[in-house]
Amino acid sequence: MCSLAAEMSGTVAAALRSAASGPSADDAGDGVDLGALSYRDLKDRVVDLTGERARVEGEYLAALGELASRVGAQAAAHQLRELTRMNSAQARSESRLAQSLVEHDMAASLEPLKSGEIQTSHAKVIAREAPKKHRRSEEEFLELCRVYSSDTVARHPLAYASLEVYADLEAEANAAGLGPIDAELALQRHERSGSMRLGSDGMWHLFAKLDFISGRQVSAAIQAAVRSQRRRRADDDTGSDSGADGAEPTRAQLTADAISELIAGTANMRRANTSLMIIADYDTVNDRLANPRLDDGTPLSAQQLAEHTVDAKVLPAVFSADWSELALGRSRNASDAQRLVLAVRDGGCIGCEFTSEHTQSHHIEYFENGGLTDIGNLASMCEPCHKDLHQHERQIDTPPDGRPRLMPPEHDNSGPPARAPATARSP
């Protein structure tokens, strides 16, 4: 181990010296003036460089995995910290990821990473989930990762596509008195974790891994507390909560305050009511509820549906195929009922799929231009996507099924895009 560490030390040190001396003529780049590129050329360059970064990261994880398999992930992380000045958390995370890929013989995942077909975040999902019992195979995960973003793939790790595995799952679940979805919840509950540590920046860092039910409940409670803080600030003329520079707190700062209030409590805290939205379709043939799920599509079992609806408020509703019901005409803000329908229809932010408790109701045809507060003219958007839409004049596509989606930015190819006016319009 000492000999290998010394060898690595010399190799990495040489690489660092080479990097410090500046690029050579061969790798100095093409001297492109980024400011002169058209929007399309700039976009293509970013995509190409993303693929190149993935290739380098694939080579890096392969080498790091080999090192970790020889000296252990902790020792490899120590080398990264000492020789590259990488922070401890990143060094440990990357060393463990690389070691997992090598130990579970997942070389197949490194090849599409090197070619830019998938990203490192995909590799993390595969390394974490594929070795577990009754998860999809590495090959099945790779097929999903080539099509979907890593957070989408991570939401549904069970191998439902395999009838053989599903039968095995069902047999085990029946023996334990649990359905497959209940078994998944039990597994996530077993893998829950939390920590709070004093960071190197002198601030406390809070981290938690929660199951898909508890996580949505906590997320809803935090966002309700953020909204409560904003209302409280609007009612407070003193501005006592402003920062040292008098600026309004950011959403991230409000979220930190909300977490502190929810955990520690404060004298003036007004705890907001929260809810967990569960959707079920009514099966008219069998006269029962079917397909229970959260608004983001996460499936629930009949047992989970029963547990959470015993004391819940049940809202029966029938909507037209294009979701055009529940119109309020010229009312400025969407009603609570409309917000529920939007959560069901959109499944979260139409731009980035952030969960519904983080979203606002945006008027597709602006309210000041005569847009109505109708479901067909509303869309769920998180605050960052909402601001981006107004600042860059993004467009929203409204297909026949009534589920709007934020379109990617399109600009003339002749030069940089025109800047939006400094004052963004309200929704």
Image (tube, helix red, strand yellow):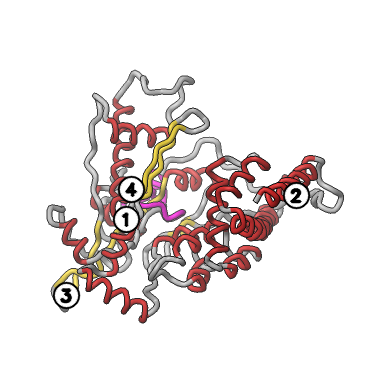
Mark found first going from the N terminus, 1 or 3: 1
At label 2, the amino acid type is Thr
At label 1, the amino acid type is His
Residue in front for this viewpoint, 191 or 298: 191
Q: Is residue 413 visible?
A: no
Q: Distance of mark 3 from mark 2, alpha carbons?
A: 69 Å
Judge whether residue 311 is colored magenta: no
Numbered tag placed on residue 190 in the rendering? 1
Residue stretch in magenta: 351-373
Circle 3: is it few (<14), some (14-19), or many (20+) Cα within 10 Å? few
Measured along the vertical axis of the image, is residue 115 above or below residue 375? below
Circle 1: is it few (<14), some (14-19), or many (20+) Cα within 10 Å? few
Mark found first going from the N terminus, 2 or 4: 2
Specify the quadrant that holds the C terminus.
top left
Q: Quadrant of residue 340?
A: bottom left
Q: Secondary structure at mark 4?
A: helix
Query: Which residue position holds label 2?
Result: 11
Judge whether residue 356 is colored magenta: yes
Numbered tag placed on residue 365 in the rendering? none
Q: Is 75 on the left or on the right of 45, as rendered?
A: left
Q: Distance of mark 1 from mark 2, alpha carbons?
A: 42 Å
Residue 121, x across and y down, in percent: 53, 57
Residue 387, x across and y down, in percent: 47, 43
Numbered tag placed on residue 357 in the rendering? 4
At label 4, the amino acid type is Glu
Q: Nearer the viewer, mark 1 or mark 2?
A: 2
